[in-house]
Amino acid sequence: MKNTDYYHKPVLAQAVLDILEPRPSQVIVDCTVGLGGHAEAIAERIGPDGMLVGLDKDVETLEQARMRLEPFAMNVRLVHEDFRNLALIKERLRLTTIDAILFDLGLSSHQLSRSERGFSFMREGTLDMRFDRSQGLTAQEVVNTFDERALEKCFREYSEERHASRIAAMLVTERKKHPIETTTQLADIAYRSLGRFYRKRRIHPATKVFQALRILVNDELTGLSLALEGARESISPGGKICIIAFHSLEDRMVKNAFRAWLSDGSFKSITKKPIRPAIHEIQENPRSRSAKLRAVEKIYCN
């Protein structure tokens, strides 16, 4: 059966193209290449004399991107690497110029659809949640070994969950009966601990729990902080940085970083307000509903 994962349309695709304006001979870095949706559209526009560098720490989605981008193999360089190392990657690849940098911080459909990855509570699977499956810590280890205070801190800091203490307490109680090993087990515990608080909300009680664990397991906020600094250092004058965030913690970090860059005069704003998906895009892809795109352009080198 033919794998069609990599044909999924990326979030805010036209907005990304309108802002970055990819042109022949440019060098553009897609720091979260995922299934290659944005990268494909960019590669078509920069032509054979340009270069698209695609980074991803998830080797499985990187292989999906490789298949999708095969027609552009001559001007695409895919790298299994964490975007927090952007400045080092620029040096390693000997890139003298970077004309645009893109971050799409959302999960790919490939990650969500694979039950063994553990990112979604919509299907039963192992509680893994690692982007790079060669690293050590898994979500299963977190929920079964972290003490109640550490679990509460995780849910409070990484998903701003108001009922973090209630969730942590029930997790500790339930794991004494049997190990928490699957996504559905965790989702059931979240529902039983928070169900009555979420009856009038559209999101499932497990949504924030899964978000917090994923952020912790992958050290996402530290990674984003380092990546923002790497992007600021690596982008060439006149180059653009475009970031799509999907939850408030990420978006707040991006907004604050951009504000600091604007205040020292080294960048100018492209998006006065974040760009959100149109209604038709949300209808086609409900996961895009929380996306916010922000972009800036570098004026000079610090």
Image: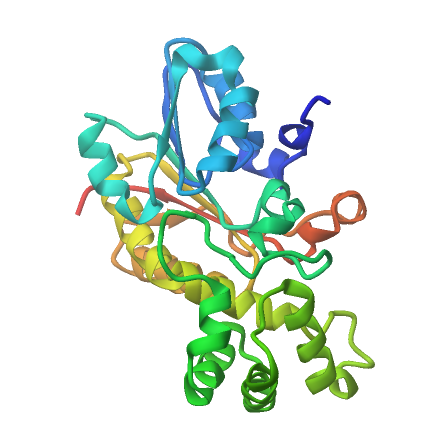
How many marks can you see? 0
Up/down of 49 relative to 91, above or below: above
Question: Closer to the camera, 222 or 148?
Answer: 148
Question: Closer to the camera, 190 or 69?
Answer: 190
Left or right of 270? Residue 268 is: left
Up/down of 150 relative to 255, above or below: below
Up/down of 168 relative to 68, above or below: below
Q: Would you say residue 33 is visible in this rendering?
A: no
Question: Closer to the camera, 116 or 26?
Answer: 116
Left or right of 3? Residue 269 is: left
Left or right of 136? Residue 200 is: right
Residue occupying image coordinates x 30% and y 30%: 98
Image x and y of residue 25, in percent: 37, 15
Quadrant of res 210: bottom right
Colour option used: rainbow
Residue occupying image coordinates x 47% and y 32%: 62
Look at the image and tell me in which quarter the N terminus lies: top right
* Extreme residue toward the front, this view: 178
Image x and y of residue 298, in percent: 31, 42
Residue occupying image coordinates x 75% and y 51%: 286
Image x and y of residue 145, in percent: 43, 77
Q: Would you say residue 222 is visible in this rendering?
A: yes
Residue occupying image coordinates x 78% and y 87%: 196
Quadrant of res 297: top left
